[in-house]
Image: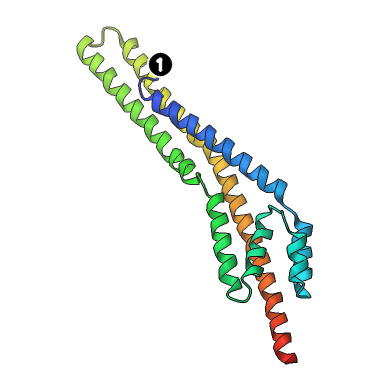
Amino acid sequence: MQNGGPVMWPLLACSIVVVTVIGERLLFWIQIKRRRNSKLMDESLRLAESGDWQQIKEKTRGCEDHVIRMLNVGIMHREYDMSKAMEAEARQMSKKMSQFMTVLDTMITVAPLLGIFGTVLGIISSFKMLGTSGIADPKLVTGGIAQALITTATGLAIAIITVFPYNYFKSRIEDAIHVMEKYATSLEVVYQKLRSGTINET
């Protein structure tokens, strides 16, 4: 911190923000994984094929799986607009999944820029020193430039470390959205088959 100069303080703040957000997102995805219930999702679709909506409601009561919650919202609004109801629920869930992702994206961009800014400030002060003392002691100048480069190295390190969890969280979001779309489409197809069968019978 002393060698890097004043710009090291905002870089320290960036690193604290990154660690906090990564920790919060990791806990969030661990909770999502614990709540997943693939067997119950498939069972809900099988019950939907027979139109046993009450049985689905009873079996999924208290379940915190986001996909099952989305299916329940669709079933609840099946007489009005199942597709839009599930879409709204899925959009709300994807918003929660994407929370703080813009913060990580910003840190990936800002940290290296802050590092370069600190280096430029350090080089300017080194050249000022060179202008006042001449080349009597070049070690002072080269030492100042070396210290100035610490901020660039720190900024790049923060950005590089942040890229990996950022891309991991993005892939998790894409996978979760894909699963929600898959089950929502399956429920819509099942419901349309039931409706067409009922219409044909009448």
Give the labeled residue for mark 1.
3
Quarter of the rendering occupied by the C terminus = bottom right
Query: At 34% from the left edge and 30% from the top edge, which residue is drawn?
Result: 117
Query: At 61% from the left edge and 43% from the top edge, which residue is drawn?
Result: 28
Q: Where residue 133 sits in the image (x, y, percent)?
A: 22, 9
Quadrant in the rendering for residue 137 = top left
Quarter of the rendering occupied by the N terminus = top left
SS state under label 1 = loop
Q: Where residue 63 sits in the image (x, y, percent)?
A: 71, 54
Q: Is residue 180 above or below residue 199?
A: above
Q: Is residue 99 above or below residue 126?
A: below
Q: Where residue 145 sits in the image (x, y, percent)?
A: 35, 20
Q: Is residue 71 above or below residue 24?
A: below
The answer to whether residue 153 is seen in the rendering is: no
The answer to whether residue 87 is seen in the rendering is: yes
- Which amino acid is tagged 1? Asn
